[in-house]
Image (tube, rainbow, N blue to C red):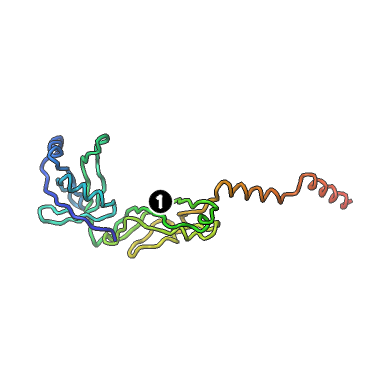
Amino acid sequence: MSEQFMIDAQPRAVVGKKVKQLRREGIIPAVIYGQDSVTNIQVNDLEVRRVLRKAGSNDLINVNVDGAQRTTLVREVQKHAVRGDLLHIDFLEVNMRETLTTEVALMMTGTAKPVKDGLGLVTQMLHTMEIECLPDALVSEIEFDAGMIATPDDFIHVRDLPRPKGVTFLADPDTLVATFEYSQAEAEEGAEAETSFLPAADMVEVIKKGKVEDEF
């Protein structure tokens, strides 16, 4: 389950160009998008920054608006292109009894045995994945162990990933997540080894001639 955060907010009557004055006063305009309504709110700049530094896109944020708590997810944060100042925040209200669909990050940990043996590296092919779950089962990321690749011929697929309780993976189970790749030196050495087993050109010619003579 993802961590839950809390922030205080107030209803906002100021809209349009007048919100610039709010920002000068350290107040950030925001909106809560509910299923049937849109609520204009305002939040303290420093307070919301502290929350956003810790909260990810899949962390629940309880927004207290005049004493009424609304459970939300951050869906968009607008910032000044140069200064990085907060300009506007969109919150999406969630129903704790309804499933939702979102993307989570896939984080690879550990070390595969072929990597420990110096043969090459593990390459992660899939970095995010769609999941479905109730809000209280949300996770910010899914970790998987590269150690599942025990030999250079092993792969990690979606079906091999640990599944958090209450979470459904929407990706195809056969989707490739990570694979092993030989280092250039190992690949060249393997190619040289294969070449050494090929018969010489003159030997091939002699064999062919001999076969033709036997047929007559």
- The kind of residue on which mark 1 rests is His
Q: Is residue 66 above or below residue 88?
A: below
Instruction: Please state the horizontal and vertical placement of residue 162, each as a whole percent of the image.
Output: 40, 62
| Image-based side of 200 in relation to 37, left or right | right
| Image-based side of 68 in relation to 132, left or right | left
Location of residue 173 by image quarter: bottom left
Farthest bottom residue in view:
165
Q: Few, some or many C-alpha atoms within 10 Å of disc 1 (few <14, some 14-19, many ≥20)? A: few
Farthest right residue in view:
216
Instruction: Please state the horizontal and vertical placement of residue 54, each as a whole percent of the image.
Output: 26, 52
User: Which corner quadrant holds the N terminus?
Assistant: bottom left
Instruction: Please state the horizontal and vertical placement of residue 96, each as a whole percent of the image.
Output: 23, 60
| Image-based side of 18 in relation to 215, left or right | left
- At horizontal 41% and vertical 56% (from top left) the residue drawn is 109
- At horizontal 14% and vertical 37% (from top left) the residue drawn is 24
Q: Is residue 18 above or below residue 103?
A: above
- At horizontal 22% and vertical 50% (from top left) the residue drawn is 51
- At horizontal 58% and vertical 47% (from top left) the residue drawn is 185
Task: From the viewer's side, name the closer residue of 140 and 95.
Answer: 140
Instruction: Please state the horizontal and vertical placement of residue 200, each as a whole percent of the image.
Output: 76, 46
How many callouts does the rendering have? 1
| Image-based side of 82 in relation to 16, left or right | right
Q: Secondary structure at mark 1?
A: loop
**Residue bearing mark 1:** 127
Task: From the viewer's side, name the closer residue of 26 and 87.
Answer: 26
